[in-house]
Amino acid sequence: MHLAPAIPVLRVFAWQQASDFYLDFLGFTLDWEHQFEADLPRYAQIRRSELVLHLSEHHGDSTPGGVVFVPVTGIDAFQQELASKRYRYARPGVEEVPWGKVMEVADPFGNRLRFCELEPEPASEPARR
């Protein structure tokens, strides 16, 4: 058996706000979206690098207020990219923590993305003979 990476499903309430946040601000691209009819909820897949998320307007999908932990490299450059966009509702900073650097960004619906650049593991010393 093989387990593939999980794809978090995040509950969103308004597609335009979700698009502004995830696509325009965070730099994700839209892989696909689905609606049964124009006035029904939307379900979409977005991606940035290897991170894939599903966004759902459907009532029964997920609960707002969850956290997605996202391992990253280059967190300082990512923070600078976001700061340069001057997004009206978020200006995240990077925090130094004992295990690395963290930048947490909350979407307009209460979901949080916790980007973390972990400190490299210290090199182990060679065994002595």
Image (tube, rainbow, N blue to C red):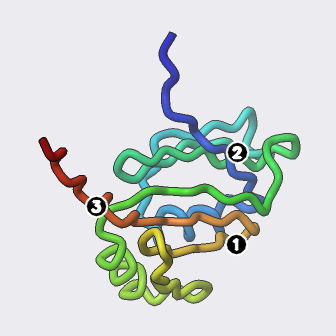
Depth check: 121 or 70 in front? 121
Which quadrant would residue 117 be assigned to in this image? Answer: bottom left
Name the residue at 43% across, 74% down.
101
What separation in Å lies between label 2 and label 3 (alpha carbons)?
46 Å
Which residue does the numbered mark 2 point to in the structure image?
42
Which numbered disc flags the more N-terminal residue, 2 or 3? Answer: 2
x, y percent for residue 56: 71, 46
Which residue does the numbered mark 3 point to in the structure image?
122
Q: Amino acid at mark 3?
A: Pro
Q: Is residue 7 left or right of residue 30?
A: right
Q: Amino acid at mark 1?
A: Pro
Q: Is residue 48 left or right of residue 18?
A: left
Q: Is residue 125 left or right of residue 89?
A: left
Q: Is residue 3 left or right of residue 8?
A: left
Depth check: 5 or 88 in front? 5
Q: Amino acid at mark 2?
A: Arg
Q: Residues within 10 Å of mark 1 (few under 14, many from 20)?
A: some
**Tag nearer the camera, 1 or 2:** 1
What element does badge 1 sit on?
loop
Depth check: 47 or 57 in front? 47
- The quarter of the rendered structure image containing the C terminus is top left
